[in-house]
Image (cartoon, rainbow, N blue to C red):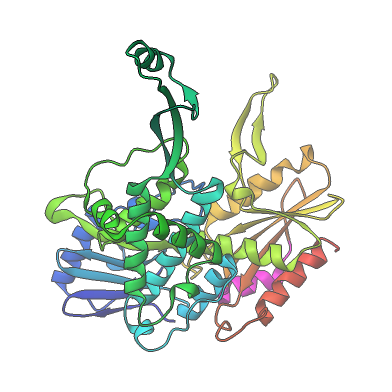
Amino acid sequence: MKGGANKGSTGISATDLSPIEGMDRNDEDWLRELARNANSDTLSLSFVTQREVQQAPIVSYDSQTGIWWAGRFVGELTYQGRTLTILPRFGMPALRRWLSRIWGIRLLSSTGRYASGKIWLWELIARLWSDRIVVAAKHGLPCIRIDEVHSGSTVRGRLLVRQTAVNLHLGRQMLVSRTRIRRIDSRIGGVLLGAYDHLRQQLRDVAEPRLWLTDRGHELVKELQSSIDRRAVEEACRSRSPIRYTPISESYRPAIDLSLTILGRHPFMSSAEGSNAVYGALLDMAEIWELYLFHLIRDALSEAEVTHAGRSSEAVFWLLTGKSGDRIGAMKPDILLSSRDGARRIILDAKYKSTTPSPSRPHGVLREDLYQMAAYLSVEAISPGTLDGGLVYPSSTAVSSLESKSPFRVQRSDAQFFFFGLNCSDFVNSIGLTPAEIQFVAGLRSHLQL
């Protein structure tokens, strides 16, 4: 899909990492105000629990060329009655394929109303919501403990000595005891069910819940529905009081945060308030590209050790080590591959960036990306086995040229430096691996001598 923009009476449509063209002065003024008030951190949906936020502009203005550019996000933002829609530059088939690989399911086909409306975004939000409630329920449904006091001839639970003594003193032969029972938290459960109902309503014309809700998610919804009545759901969704979490229900906070924004009919909102509020939802294509590559490699190279190091809480390497053992410069490359014996390893960094050549980057790649990989490969001297590296981009003419000349050599360490480009145009109606994916995986297998 070529970059560019289509201007409508109430909004602007563009594609990620592409110039936004065809705007008049009023459009540019509106876009400038949107950029000033929108926050990519609060507006973006994340697919991972451990996320190192990297601030990036949603749109930017190049003063040298006088051109507005869309950033790496896709989605929709509404500001002061107008909408900015940013679609994936490689088309919806590519995005669906990447997300299908990440989630292990096939997403809906981009036809009819699904292609022209906001349904594609609601489907992704629904899938993300489904994942969050399943993760939250790892140790069970959200419960609270309630004390129940019993009086009778037998003890139920713990004997309440003082209350029992009072009864006996008054001549009542009654034992007083207390039990603690667990009940579903109606506020948390009600908000979850309210969000589920809203998602089902948004997708009613294109998909049954079974198509976006996992089997485990379906079980959890059924359990909540059997425990919480409709009135409690409505009260939970209307309430504006803060939700109190216990150690048992704390895992539900991410799912509730998403559910509350779904119930507001605006998936997310920026930090701006009042007339400057920006509503909408964005997907970080850099994050999706990284996750897609990891799942592709892990599934296709079962004979190798594949680690998603970029999402690890600990550093894989350190850039500097002092005499006293101090370490500075934590290094966490996106993906680390190694042969089973550890003799051969390769670091991969996913780069969802524009690779159009320019005077500042004649080969299409940013100098900072080269420096980053060179820093990773500088640790070879203190690590066992060979260590090579590669940058993986969506394919372009510039990347293909560098790929054909790979591997390059890093000075001093003599590590091999690869450029990989994946063709993103052959994804339509492909169920198995595409030729580009097969070629990419074969290159990694050959390098690791698997």
Left-right relation of 196 to 379: left
- The residue positioned 35% from the left and 10% from the top of the image is 169
Q: Residue at x 21, y 46 (%)?
A: 240
Q: Is residue 243 above or below residue 325?
A: below
Residue drawn at the location 66% of the way across and 78% of the way down: 436
Query: What is the residue that sits farthest to the top in this orientation?
Result: 169
Check the image and report above or below for 198 versus 36. Answer: below
Q: Position of residue 192 (x, y in %)?
A: 37, 56
In magenta stretch: residue 403: yes
Give the side of residue 384 with respect to residue 227, left or right. Answer: right
Q: Nearer the viewer, residue 102 or 249?
A: 249
Q: Would residue 38 be seen by someone viewing this image from the given angle?
A: no
Residue ID at (66%, 46%)? 376
> Could you tell me which quadrant the N terminus lies in?
bottom left
Q: Residue 168: x percent and y percent?
A: 38, 14
Q: Is residue 432 magenta?
A: no
Report the magenta residues as a range: 395-407
423 left or right, relative to 90: right
Q: Position of residue 36 (x, y in %)?
A: 23, 54
Q: Residue furthest bottom?
A: 112
The relative height of residue 80 versus residue 250 in the rendered view (above or below) is below
Q: Mark yes or no: residue 241 visible.
A: yes
Q: Main secondary structure of the magenta part?
A: helix
Q: Quadrant of the C terminus?
A: bottom right
> Tag count in the figure?
0
Is residue 421 placed above or below 281 in the rendered structure? below
161 or 296, nearer to the observer: 161
**Quadrant in which residue 323 is drawn:** top right
Residue 43 spot, x, y in % from top left: 33, 56
* Residue nearest the viewer, comparing 370 with 229: 229
